[in-house]
Amino acid sequence: MKTLDETRLLQFKKNLSSCVNIKSKTFYNKELILSYSPIKKKIGFITEGKANIVKTDKEGNTTIMRDLKENDIFSNLFFQDSEDEIYIISNGKTEVIFIDYYNIIKNCNQNCPFHNSIVLTLFDLLIEDNKQQNEKIELLSKRTVEEKILFFLKQRMNENNIFKVTTSYKAIAEYLFVDRSNLMRELKKMEEKGLIERYEKTIKILS
Amino acid sequence: MKTLDETRLLQFKKNLSSCVNIKSKTFYNKELILSYSPIKKKIGFITEGKANIVKTDKEGNTTIMRDLKENDIFSNLFFQDSEDEIYIISNGKTEVIFIDYYNIIKNCNQNCPFHNSIVLTLFDLLIEDNKQQNEKIELLSKRTVEEKILFFLKQRMNENNIFKVTTSYKAIAEYLFVDRSNLMRELKKMEEKGLIERYEKTIKILS
DNA sequence: ATATTACTGTTGCATTTGCAACAATAATAA
DNA sequence: TTATTATTGTTGCAAATGCAACAGTAATAT
């Protein structure tokens, strides 16, 4: 069922260093990993840690557009020129490999056997990203805050139906595009309804 | 700026028929083009017409997740197994090329020169799709219905700041995930505010 | 250790939004 | 043509939501 397994990702990282020019870099909390640029077209691959795609509009409102984690791909190619500013920001210690887009689209001169494999893996990583975006769109299509919360929790809970807030409720509210105080209020209501149990940053999903 | 030009897309279609197995098919209005399937992994490419990605939840609520048009790519690989049902539905007469995913990932036996080119174009088409998804997420991140409407209109207006509703207000409301009657109400308010002018299905954006 | 900043939890209130219902018109089918 | 179905435009109303403000706690910096 899963398109990309560990072995293949390992192979991918090896192939990358054998074929195209890559740069590996470590970021610490809240550092700028990548911003929009029509010139320097880069693809990034997270080898360790987490990051967010964050948008800031001209009024200064920031929204978290996406959560990224280990083995996720990202690129400034994914964004159109816009009034709003879009950045990829590290969330804790994060390790990233950068790949130059031109290295991908031009066939490497040595006609190396790695190139095809790399492109195919990138292709599958993109499909994976596409899937995650569709999930976010599905989340946002939910009509009420309660539905959004439940969808979000069910996506992320572990096998014991537990979800631990590793970031903050503020960040979750931003991710769901809802008001933070309303998120808290809905969580309380959901607890009263018996949908969840909550103790500080640990939530058990009962439904 | 644009990653994919006409010439390249033409070449792509030629290459496709030379290398991988493809099936071309014509659909008429509201026909099922593709549904979720973990087994038959297919990639579709719209050569003519329009389509929608439509989701139906278990209560029967349908939402239009995406608009697709000529030269857009889609796939059942983009969707996770979910309680909701997701379909690609034609919107008027639509012509589609289907590509078998396995044909893409396996190197074709003849080691043909087209294969690489095809995969690279698919890669760029996926990036384009990714971009469109981000736009939809950005749209949904807007806090009020008015902001959503304006973002939507500005994205789609022509050089004279005119947008013509080719589908229906009902469809637009579904696409924006807002109540239809509220969409109408907001449009009226926006006209009163002087943000737009509207005559039936023609809207002029003034701001 | 203390100050400073950020996050949590709560509430009242105003506004926005969705829902329901309806008549009027437009589009489509028989 | 006529009947049937779908869309448009409108409104009252209830419910959901965001906003503002605040105190209390936690986390971080000095």
Image: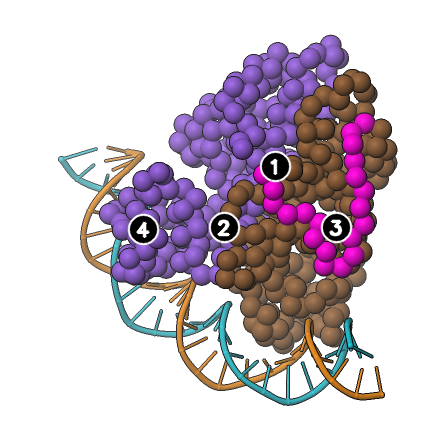
Chain colours: A purple, B brown, C cyan, D orange
Mark 1 sits on what residue?
B39
Provide the residue span drawn in magenta: B19-39
* Crowd rating for badge 1 (residues with CA inside 10 Å; few <14, some 14–19, many 20+): few
Q: Is residue B170 visible?
A: yes
Badges 2 and 3, same chain: yes
Q: Amino acid at mark 4?
A: Leu
- Residue B40 x/y as whole percent: 65, 38
Mark 2 sits on what residue?
B83
Q: Secondary structure at mark 2?
A: loop
Q: Nearer the viewer, residue A130 or D19?
A: A130
Q: Nearer the viewer, mark 3 or mark 1?
A: 1
Mark 3 sits on what residue?
B69
Relative vertical location of residue B117 with respect to residue B93 in this rendering, above or below: above
Of labels 2 and 3, earlier in sequence is 3
Q: Residue at x 64, y 21 (%)?
A: A118
Numbered circle sitting on residue A198: none
Q: Nearer the viewer, mark 4 or mark 1?
A: 1
Q: Is residue B193 visible?
A: no
Q: Amino acid at mark 3?
A: Lys
Relative vertical location of residue A206 with respect to residue A49 in this rendering, above or below: below
Question: Going by the image, does B1 lie left or right of B175?
Answer: right
Q: Nearer the viewer, residue A24 or B71?
A: B71
Q: How many angstroms separate mark 4 from mark 2 (CA)? A: 17 Å
Q: Amino acid at mark 1?
A: Ile
Q: Residue at x 65, y 19 (%)?
A: A117
Of labels 1 and 2, earlier in sequence is 1
Q: How many angstroms separate mark 4 from mark 1 (CA)? A: 32 Å
Q: How many angstroms separate mark 3 from mark 1 (CA)? A: 26 Å
Mark 4 sits on what residue?
A206
Q: Nearer the viewer, residue B19 or B63?
A: B19
Question: Going by the image, does A146 lie left or right of B141?
Answer: left
